[in-house]
Amino acid sequence: MDLRNIAIIAHVDHGKTTLVDELLKQSGTYRENQATTERAMDSNDIERERGITILAKATSVEWKGVRINIVDTPGHADFGGEVERILSMVDGVCLLVDAAEGPMPQTKFVTSKALALGLKPIVVLNKVDKPAAEPDRALNEVFDLFANLGASDAQLDFPHIYASGIGGWADLTLDGSRKDLSALFDLILAHVEAPRQISRRDEPFRMLATTLGLDPFIGRILTGRVESGRLKVGETLKALSRTGEKLEQFRVSKILAFRGLSQTAIDLAEAGDIVTVAGMSKANVADTLCDLSIDVALPAQPIDPPTISVTFGINDSPLAGRDGAKVQSRVIRDRLLREAESNVAIKVEDTPSGDAFVVSGRGELQMGVLIENMRREGFELSISRPRVIFRDIDGERHEPLEEVIIDVDDEYAGAVIDKLTSARKGDLVEMRPAGHGKTRIVAHVPSRGLIGYQGEFMTDTRGNGVLNRIFHSWTPYRGPIQGRRQGVLVSMEAGVSVAFALWNLEDRGKMFIGAQEQVYEGMIIGEHSRDNDLDVNPLKGKKLTNMRASGTDEAVRLTTPVRMSLEAAIAYIDDDELVEVTPKAIRMRKRYLDPHERKRAAKVG
């Protein structure tokens, strides 16, 4: 069967996974009576909850006798390690752009990778049926983006199509029939070239591994595109590292191909197709699986280096071991190394103490998703504040700089610009009206200045602002940046919190806990209204006497406490604080629980 391999690129919430749902339905992938779900490609629980694509996944549809392998790529730059590998498997990209918002930062990130590989794009202007849609403006912005990214003349001569993923239609003109997606299918067949690997089917077998998985029945599995030759079940292959070193020799126990949403066992894999191979024990992502006669590894796409690091440690609080079963440092280390094996954008290093591990990655969201997965698996952890990774370039210290694009109501634009430029050492690049009473702000801000800024931004914009960020470049170190301005309220007792005590503490600041919650000495229970930390007693009850009160009692009515999400807590803490993560709770605490230790550490610091 003739083949096409294509990746779909889009910013978060531009409708990519919804469009793939419709492609699957209209290509006849589902049986007539088959039960289907929304966002079928977002199979991970966290992906469904957050509405984002985290893991790159492939599917396959048939149209007019041609098999189209479709790869759904992550829409967030924090998961860009997935994107950089996946794009090496395809021959074209389908760039999905919201007709109202235009190309956004994550679109820019993935598109730059695709253009650098020489892939020719198809631009799909999605959501053109929205009231605020401006497809002509969005199309011009896409052209400008391609030009700025150094696209070739052939790439700039891209076809475009108007679509509504949720409506299930695509047309070459705005005033088309709006019936189905047949125009998009036909455009893919016409514009995307068949894999050039098809002409190499008589050569020895070679395949570059791009994703790693673990199947409970067949063990370690590697997915990639067959670069040359044919492969049958039972044949013997060898695995070569990037440098050409032989890692192992193994017998192929199973070959799986994507057919719709599921993977089906096949007897023969041919050059050009995207398949999954089982049987190896050591081979990893970016390794070459090849015939025994081959000694040269396939070139692997370089991966951008990490920009932030977080320390994962054992949970050593007084409440440790109550919720989770996986609490030992050995178990935590094994889990982190397993993650680093399948996700090449993550690096894991041991600390001298041996009970903590430095995990480096792309951003706070990537770290948050890893921690959330671990707590759901029964782990208990203590997490440090994210730290930016510095680089020495020509003997000068450099730090990562991020491009921030903000859409905000006109009345709040001044406050946002002031925070980004003066307090967080950013540079304003562009400011223009975005229509409908909104302003678009583009700024270049050091990554250090954005750690913990999301919560402050939502407060400044009354929850109406939208902030998108992406790594831009390395910049010379810009000097110290002020961290959190407020101090915290720290419990000086261990026990169960009392409503009367919390009610009296409300004058001191915002509370993070409610009544009848377990607390311990050194646990952070609220934010102080001033800039210093304050030790308080949340267990102090009302003094009782045998005298009867006459109308002097006040009813205790507590303000609803602020409940921190995992990412919010990690961004909120200071350098001398930790986040305690268990399957059932997220707490913040001081690194040193004893107040005397804290004072000594402050003097040394």
Image (cartoon, helix red, strand yellow):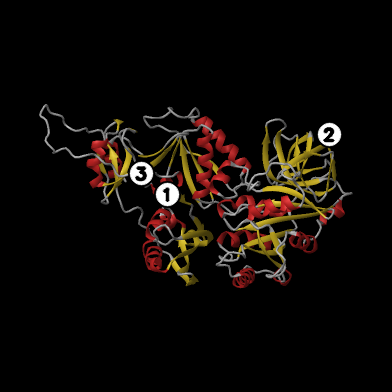
* First of labels 2, 3 by sequence position: 2
Q: Nearer the viewer, mark 2 or mark 1?
A: 1
Q: Nearer the viewer, residue 469 or 496?
A: 496
Provide the residue designation for mark 1: 571
The disc labelled 2 sits on which kind of residue?
Gly
In this view, 16 is above or below 162: above
Q: Which residue is mark 3?
A: 576
Element type at marker 3?
loop
Horizontal side, residue 361 vs residue 229: left or right: left
Residue 425 image label: none
**What residue is drawn where x is 83% and y is 45%?**
205
Q: Position of residue 452 (x, y in %)?
A: 41, 52
Left or right? Give the position of 398 relative to 535.
right
- The residue located at (39%, 65%) in the rendering is 412
SS state under label 1: helix
Q: Are marks 2 and 1 in contact (CB under 8 Å)?
A: no
